[in-house]
Every structure is written in C-alpha cells, then in structure tokens.
Amino acid sequence: MYIIVVGGGRVGYYLTKALLAEGHEVLIVERNAAYCDAIIEEMGSICLRGDGCETATQAEAGTGRADMLIAVTGDDEDNLVACQVAKHKFNVPRTIARIRNPKNEILFKKLGIDVTVSSTNIILEAIEEEVPTHPLTHLLTIRDKGLEIVEVKVSPGSSTVGRAVKELALPPESLLFLIIRKDQRPLAPVPETILQAEDQVIAVTGPQSEEALRAALRGD
C-alpha cells in the first residue's frame, strides 16, 4: 500500500516508522527543511520537502497513485486542506486527519474526511470508566451510511435502571444491538429486556442523535 503522510513532526515520524515496519511504501511531505533532512538521514529518501496543502506538491508526491493520505501536522486547517486536495484532486480512496480541537471533528466529517483522529477524545474515551461526565464512547464510524457505533454505560444512579428497553425514548434512527454485563454472556436486547446498573450498551445511531441516545439510556 502506498501511503502519504503529511507532516514530519513527532507524530508523522513515528507513524512512518511503524508503517515502514509493516511493509508499506511511505512518503512524508514536510515543509520544514531541518525535519526533512533528519528523516532522510535516518530512513532514506522518503521525505519530500514541500507544502502538503498544495496541489503541485501532492502531484510531485504521486498522490494520484496513493491508497491513503494521512495528515498529521499540528494545524487542523492544514490537515483538512491536505485531505481535501487528496480526495477531490487526486481521488485518493482513504483520507485520515489528525485533529487537535475536538470541536472540528463534525466539520471535518461533513467536508468528506474519511477518518478523524482527536487525541483529546481518545484520552477521554480510554478513561471513560473513571470519568462519569464522559459516558459515551465512539467505537466505529460507518462513513458511507452516516452512522456511528457507540457504547453507553448505564451508571448505578441512572433512572433507567430497572426499566425495559421498550420504555426508553430512543431516537428514531438509533438501534440497540448488544448489552454486555459483568460475569454474564452478552445478550441481544429485546423490547422486554430490563436495563441493569453497569450495563454496557452497544448501539448504532446518527452523529446528530448521540446526545439524545445517551440521555435516553442514562435517564439524564
């Protein structure tokens, strides 16, 4: 797989090393001459000095034959533009953008970026069991369908504990398809299933309905 990484800072550097170790063909596009020289000295001629947001630079990088472009600069706007150029000018099948500000995630998805990675959200979701104010975890985005697979944990204090699924005011486009309970086998919920404290509910919903789904399952 030919992968272009826009941004040769720490994230781009370590990402490229990992991708090369997996056998991929990788090219870094980096505008900083010192970064580019250091990468070439260590890993060979895999760094192109230039602005990854520019069409001419991406053409020189061979973006037209790339299977994926990953933009990991420290600037959200640059990452967005680099991905859009790759997607719309060179028809790259898959684009991934790093996001520093989680508020930009919805905008990036609306503008056609296939995958967004927010370090802030990753950290929050990794510790969600310790953070009661962050009870919804994103598991997977089904981009072409405009859907999200999420997990919502039912806390002991939730008003929905002891209530049946059919009693919940779920958003119309949301579907519960698995409940994971401690020391029990996972079960597929039916309308009569009673929610219990600490249930981990896996559901499919639209991005615009995440808050309503969370409220319905936790009784907020």
Image (cartoon, helix red, strand yellow):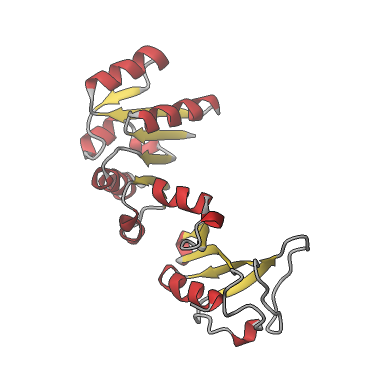
Q: Is residue 116 visible?
A: no
x then y, percent, for residue 25: 46, 28
Residue lying at the far top of the rendered structure: 41
Q: For the point 31% across and 33% down, which residue is it?
A: 7
Number of callouts? 0
Q: Is residue 63 visible?
A: yes
Residue lying at the far front of the rendered structure: 157
Looking at the image, residue 134 sits to the left or right of residue 99; the answer is: right
Residue lying at the far right of the rendered structure: 184
Looking at the image, residue 173 sits to the left or right of residue 84; the answer is: right
Please name whichever residue, 98 or 92, is drawn nearer the observer in this view of the structure.
Answer: 98
Q: Quadrant of residue 197?
A: bottom right
Q: For the point 35% across and 19% down, which residue is it?
A: 39
x then y, percent, for residue 168: 57, 83
Residue 127, compared with residue 156, is above or below; it is: above
Residue lying at the far bottom of the rendered structure: 167
Residue 41, compared with residue 27, is above or below; it is: above
Q: For the point 29% across and 39% down, which residue is it?
A: 74
Q: For the point 39% across and 27% down, which residue is it?
A: 13
